[in-house]
Image (cartoon, coloured by chain):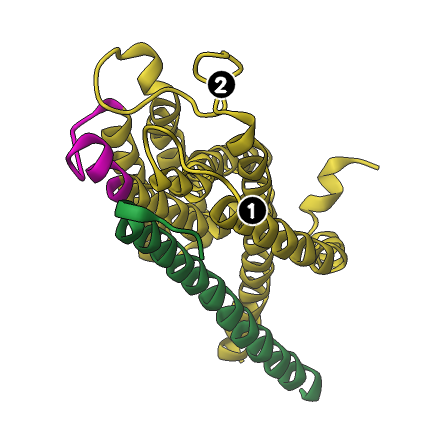
Amino acid sequence: MSLWEYANPKKFMQTSERLLPYVAVLTAVCLLVGISWGFFFTPDDFRMGSSVKIIYIHVPSAMMAINAWVMMLVTSLIWLVRRHHVSALAAKAAAPVGVTMTLIALVTGAIWGEPMWGTYWAWDPRLTSFLILFLFYLGYMALWQAIDNPDTAADLTSVLCLVGSVFALLSRYAVNFWNQGLHQGASLSLDKEEHVSDVFFFPLLICLAGFVLLFVLLVLIRARTEIRLRRLQAIEMRERMG
Amino acid sequence: MPDLGKYSVEVLSAYGLTVLLLLAISTLTWVRSRKIRRDLEQAEARLKDG
């Protein structure tokens, strides 16, 4: 069976309907177990104290902020190359979830930054590129709203998504090639010097899975809504034409 | 409840805001999904009735 079969709205609706209950249960389990484990049953860090508990929400949301944009980039490219409407609608559906993840990452980062760095905000490469990514998300959603013709909107937002991908990549790799700023390197690095201790790592891994699943769940529901909305608009158009 | 010491305000506010934002996007997604689904069902019923 070809992957492109899922670009058929009917097939997408059938498959996603079957998947949704499983994804919902897995999301709830992972978020409950991961966050409870991290919040209640992990020790304080010897330098950061109890503020280390913010890692269980900050790192997963930051990763999903970038990954959501990458997913939008892939689906936008599919739209531009193959003109599959489901892929354009999936990108549109992902943006509000991505912007929420970005906002969570920015806010929890600021709250964590104040006691650790002595400031809520610094024009650090990673923080700045994240803020620009947040603005790109807002611009992307505004562009979808601003254009009536759905195909034109999908074309223009896809191009905006390509441009914004520079900042999504910068958000991820800025700390590696700009040796300045306050933000640390990757929390989940394979490098033993940067890697977080196992006592924090395993609950963090479950929280990551929970955030990924929550993203998938919300995007599936929102993409289904967008497909229904497209059908509704077609019916209303037909009614108006008499 | 774990003893959060001097960072209790930071930790609790970070978790509180995260839960609030995740609940907001989940609720908005669910409410809009139900509304569009209902509207589409009504429109399809109208279409069927001619």
| B4 and A94: which is toward the camera | B4
Between A16 and A160, which is closer to the camera in this rendering?
A16
Residue A115 within the segment the image draws in magenta = yes
Magenta stretch: give its range: A110-125
Label 2 crowd bin: few (<14), some (14–19), many (20+), radius 10 Å: few
The picture's colour for chain A is yellow
Amino acid type at image mark 1 = Trp
Q: Hue of chain B? A: green
Q: Are marks 2 and 1 in contact (CB under 8 Å)?
A: no
- Binning the other alpha carbons within 10 Å of mark 1 as few (below 14), some (14 to 19) or many (20 upward) gives some
Q: Is residue A238 visible?
A: no
Query: Where residue A80 sits in the image (x, y, percent)?
Result: 51, 34
Between A177 and A37, the residue placed more toward the observer is: A37
Residue B20 among magenta residues: no
Q: Could you say where residue A38 lies in the image, as x and y percent from the top left?
A: 51, 44
Q: Which residue is mark 2?
A: A189
Tell me: A165 left or right of B44: left
- Marks 2, 1 in one chain: yes
User: Mark 2 falls on what kind of element?
Assistant: loop
Residue appearing at x 32%, y 33% in the figure = A48
Q: Residue at x 59, y 73 (%)?
A: B37
Q: Is residue A115 above or below residue A226?
A: above
Disc 2 versus disc 1: distance between alpha carbons? 21 Å
Q: Position of residue A110 (x, y in %)?
A: 24, 41
Q: Amino acid at mark 2?
A: Ser
Quadrant of residue A187 within the rendered picture: top left
> Mark on residue A230?
none
Say which residue label 1 marks. Answer: A37
